[in-house]
Image (cartoon, rainbow, N blue to C red):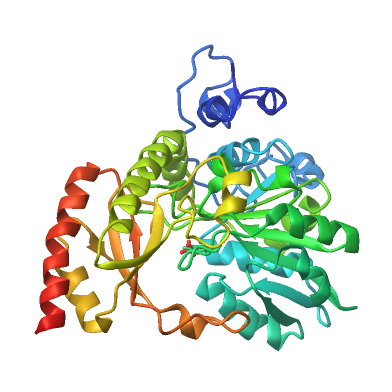
Amino acid sequence: MSGDQGEGGKLKQGTRLVHAGRRREWTGMPGDPGTIVNPPVWRASTVLYEDVAHLRSANFHTEQRLYYGRRGAPTGWALADAITQMEPEAAGTMLFPSGVAAIASALLAVLKPGDELLMVDSVYGPTRSICDGLLREIGVMTRYYDPLIGAGIADLIGEKTRAIFLESPGSLTFEVQDVPAIVAVAKDRGLITLLDNTWATPLLLPALGYGVDISILACTKYIVGHSDVMLGSVTANAALWPKVQARALMLGQMASPDDCWLALRGLRTMRVRLKEQGASALALARWLDARPEVASVLHPALPACPGHDVWARDFHGAAGLFSFDLAGGGDAARTAFIDALELFGIGYSWGGYESLALPVDPASLRSARRWDEARGPLVRINVGLEDVEDLIADMDQAFVHWRNAQSG
Ligand SMILES: *Cc1c(COP(=O)(O)O)cnc(C)c1O
């Protein structure tokens, strides 16, 4: 089957992930019965028209038709279509040069001066910067709310409240939000909901299926999956799609066709990567949970994680990113532990095929629900595709350095 959009909804997600976006007109030549498997890289600025009449009649601002390079070309459309088809309730997807650009454009699509935004307190740091910087400057005020608030969000809604932004779980502290409860309140009060779904992807949390209006992905993470491309996406339901699309086009947002091509390549294998990375992460999290060096493990599939019950009810699985508190020792011992790891890279970002370890200190990023600074130092782990036995052995030897750093 060709991956035509109309067929997408009936198929299971894994099958859609393989077929979506591979339209005949993007993988072959007119009149030639053969097609190649992957849409090639369509690079374009100028689009040539047959004659002046054709040029003047062109009004392809919102259609997937060649018009001018900034308005897109088939490589990007193939990726956008594939992401759209991952959620049957989705009307369309816009692509952006980074996840942060996607978040900024989505917020600017739904907010205007005088509006108030309800923002989850565990949100990604740069999203907080958009709220406290750009949005404040243009007269949009942000109120941060407790990630575990659930239906209690109703009490925070005022006359000016226009939208609720969710991110579940938080990417440092892993509180799982009650998405259905918050969406129900939002619908009742006529508010727009946006969700940063980077951790789960639509495979583990079909956000629009839960009634979320706008789903945002840092494709940089699991979609790309190979730590070599920056990319973001915004997917919207039919009601919000025209606004999301118009704002992105107005802001001149677009993604490079080379990056889209790499992201399409990543997307095709995302399901097996996520499954494997999720299984290894859970095995590592359980091993850590039983260690005397570890005070607590923040992994949505473990009962101690705030919101674990909600995760078990709503998610189709767990991704490969989680955190744990060391049982004391302070920053110096944490540093000794991370520096001693041989198989875990030290760096920002996540979702790639290689494991990472990162010291994180969320206290300064919180205002609605304070982070208990008396907790042990926090380490965030991205689990890659290595054999988990090797990752466990690596952590085992690094704990020796953590213990030595404390006694020394
Ligand atoms: C990385 C990340 C982003 C931003 O994506 P970039 O592509 O790095 O701009 C947004 N949200 C979450 C949860 C992230 O982890």
Residue at 52% across / 70% down in the picture?
124
Task: Give how far across and how far down residue 76 sits, in percent.
Answer: 56, 44
Residue at 55% across / 28% down in the picture?
22
Query: Left or right of 11: which side holds 153?
Result: right
Task: Give how far across and how far down residue 80 sits, in percent.
Answer: 60, 43
Q: Mark yes or no: residue 95 visible.
A: no
Query: Left or right of 350: which side holds 177?
Result: right
Q: Mark yes or no: residue 314 visible.
A: yes
Task: Give how far across and how far down residue 234 sits, in percent.
Answer: 64, 54
Count of picture labels:
0
The image quarter containing residue 176 is bottom right
The image quarter containing residue 111 is bottom right
Q: Nearer the viewer, residue 402 or 159?
A: 402
> Which quarter of the figure is the N terminus placed in?
top right
The image quarter containing residue 73 is top right
Residue at 55% across / 52% down in the picture?
45
Task: Give how far across and how far down residue 286 sits, in percent.
Answer: 34, 51
Give the farthest residue toward the top: 33
Residue at 80% across / 61% down in the picture?
192
